[in-house]
Image (spheres, coloured by chain):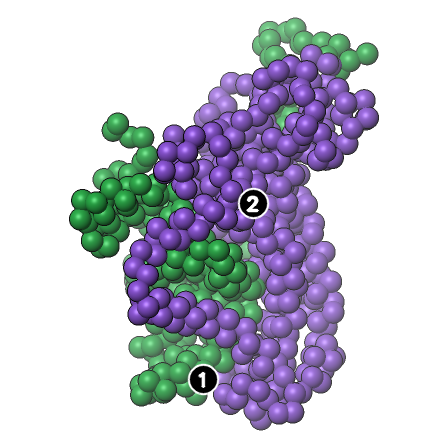
Amino acid sequence: MTAATASAPTGGRWRISQETRWAFIFLLPWIFGFLVFTAGPMIASLAISFTEYNGIRPPEFVALENYEDLLSDRRIPLALTNTAIYTLLHVPAVIILALALAMLLLRVGRASGFFRTVFYLPTITPTVAVATLFLLILGGNGLLNQGLGVLGISGPNWLTDPQWVKPGIVIMSLWSLGSTVVIYFAALRNVPLELYEAARIDGADSWQQFRNITVPFISGALFFTIVVNTIASLQIFTEVFTMFFSQRSGPAQGSALFYVIYLFQKAFSDLDFGYASAMAWLLFAIILVITIIQLRLSKRFVYYEGEGR
Amino acid sequence: MTIQQGQVGGAPPAAPVAPATARMDLAAAHGRTTGAISRILFLATLSFATFLFIFPFVWLVSASLKTRATVFNNELFPAPLYFENFPTVFELAPLATWFFNSVLVGVLAAAAVTISSALVAFAFAYFRFPFRNAIFGVVLATMMLPGAVTLIPNFLIWNALGQVNTLTPLWAGNLFASAFYIFLLRQFFLGLPRELFEAARVDGASYPRMWWNIALPLTRAALIVVFIFELKASWTDLLKPLIFLKDTALFTLPRGLQSLVSRFNPATGGQGEFQYVMAASVVITLPMIVIFFLAQRYFVEGIATTAPRAESRSVTGSPQAWCKTPVEKAIPYEQVRRGTRDPRAADVAARPSRNQGGTSWTRSSCSRPTMTP
């Protein structure tokens, strides 16, 4: 007795094959989850964004009022600017440093496994613990300023000085760049070595080799990490929330007010679900536009092996 | 076509390269200038970078052993070492309960997402059905969606189900698979030869059996990657516990630690007992470090496989670790079915396959996944 005979092919109007039927049975968890936890909520979120709603009283339709409020709320440009500054500092710094570390790893040879572990360890440290640790390190008399003091620099208080709060957060974020290093390291090891040999015979110096061989060959990985890091840094939340917003008020909350933090406050402190939903859709639009621009640019800069041969 | 490094000198391309040799060649090729000065410079840079990455961990442990008076000073070795912080913080806060909650949520979340994503991924990898590519496109598109968009409706759903202020919302959503893991596992299922499943079907295996008895055992490494990644994500997550949990007794470790920051951080008006925060930080970090060292291979390879164009070369020392699973564990299906052979047994590699060529997998047929979280 086999499974094949147990369930004979269905007749009926639709003639759905047994394979298709089983396929959709296997897909069922995702289909249900997609409808209930993604598609449904997207529609609901859009609908809520046109209402005044606090989760208790029934929602009240206010048309575009929430979106108009976005334009007049002075904390929106503040949160957007903070987030943009952070992203513009964080992404290039991560890319450059991670690439430098990956190239360093490449020269290590046999022991590269050990050093890769060293660079990777911070990324598995729970984010809240990273935040508490850097509350110590970034303080006015903290470890970082002590280190800078050795070099004769008297550092600012990275936790309270409005000008230095975001650079401080960037420094913290750089400690956790290990996964980008691992990605670059894997990509660098795929660059065919004979290209370097040929370039050397042709008299290319190190920079020319880097510029014309390494970068094109890892451009796929570069592009990918830029996109992923950009999307992630636009949504930074956990570490900043722990460090600066564990209390209702605190020093430097203005310069550490990132977009998702403000959204969280609006939604779950002020229970202004309508406004927070409008904020979420604005964020979605921004991420979409930036990603599309990056995709367009990638077509010009990303080299895919095998193409144009 | 990928070019095997270390074979530049005209070695026959089919011969597998010993990884150590290959890597030494690689290092030699990249470390071109072997002058003493550049060597010293290189070692100095490497040591400095290592120091920068390791020292915060030392600092974390050091600060957890200090007293209220010394926690903000910059002494590396506190004297005396104040180990009492650890028992004290377990008394001050229900840290043990938080720890248990975190373990419970983490294991449930990871198990749920692994099983459900494997189910869905298998559908995309193996079955032919209408609109397959379109539906898969929707799966990929959901990865783009910022969590903020669905955050409030999801809260309202769990609220309507009466599950707010329970642990359920922290993991139950994982029962419905996750786009990234579907993508990842689909790549691995695609790497399995179709002939294996066709043979099973001829033998009368049902689709669930093919999934459970063939597909899952042969992609065990990938399933472990998914499990570990989700365990880590759940262990770190602060946002969901912030939204869904109110009672202190239900907190997970990140939420609990965050509450300790607000209680003890003097800079934001808390009591100045920051050493307890640091002790709790050690408690939340240590399990992840232990798991990392136990499953390092899966962590690092999992990350590396998420990158595009990293397919020809394994990241850890073992060459082709990903491909090894299918190559060495190709088992005549009927033995698995009859239960005479555990599919996980690794000793079956030498067995010649009945269907020559059908189930012998070449390394070139092994494709590695190419995307990310």
Task: Give the labeled residue for mark 2.
Answer: B318
Q: Residues within 10 Å of mark 1 (few under 14, many from 20)?
A: some
Residue located 65% across and 6% down the image:
A11
Q: Does residue A137 lie above or below A292 as drawn?
A: below
Q: The residue tagged with tag 2: helix, strand or loop?
A: loop
**Marks 1 and 2, how far apart in space?**
42 Å
Residue located 23% across and 40% down the image:
A300
Chain A's colour is: green
Question: Is residue A257 among the parts visible in the rendering?
Answer: no
Chain B's colour is: purple
Residue located 59% across and 48% down the image:
B298
**Along the line of sight, the residue nearer the viewer: A94 or B253:** A94
Task: Tell me: B218 left or right of A205.
Answer: right
Residue located 49% across and 32% down the image:
B15
Q: Does residue B344 lie above or below A245 as drawn?
A: above
Q: Which residue, as the protein is rendered here, is positioned at the far left?
A: A203
Kindly indicate whether the residues beneath marks 1 and 2 are on one polypeptide chain: no
- The amino acid beneath tag 1 is Gly
Residue A308 falls in image quadrant: top left
Residue B176 point in image, percent of width and height: 62, 39
Chain holding disc 2: B
Residue B77 point in image, percent of width and height: 57, 87
Chain holding disc 1: A
What quarter of the picture does the N terminus of chain B occupy?
top left
Residue B164 point in image, percent of width and height: 65, 56
Task: Give the labeled residue for mark 1.
Answer: A142
**Along the line of sight, the residue nearer the viewer: B13 or B357:** B13
Q: Which mark is residue B331?
A: none
**Along the line of sight, the residue nearer the viewer: B78 or B101:** B78
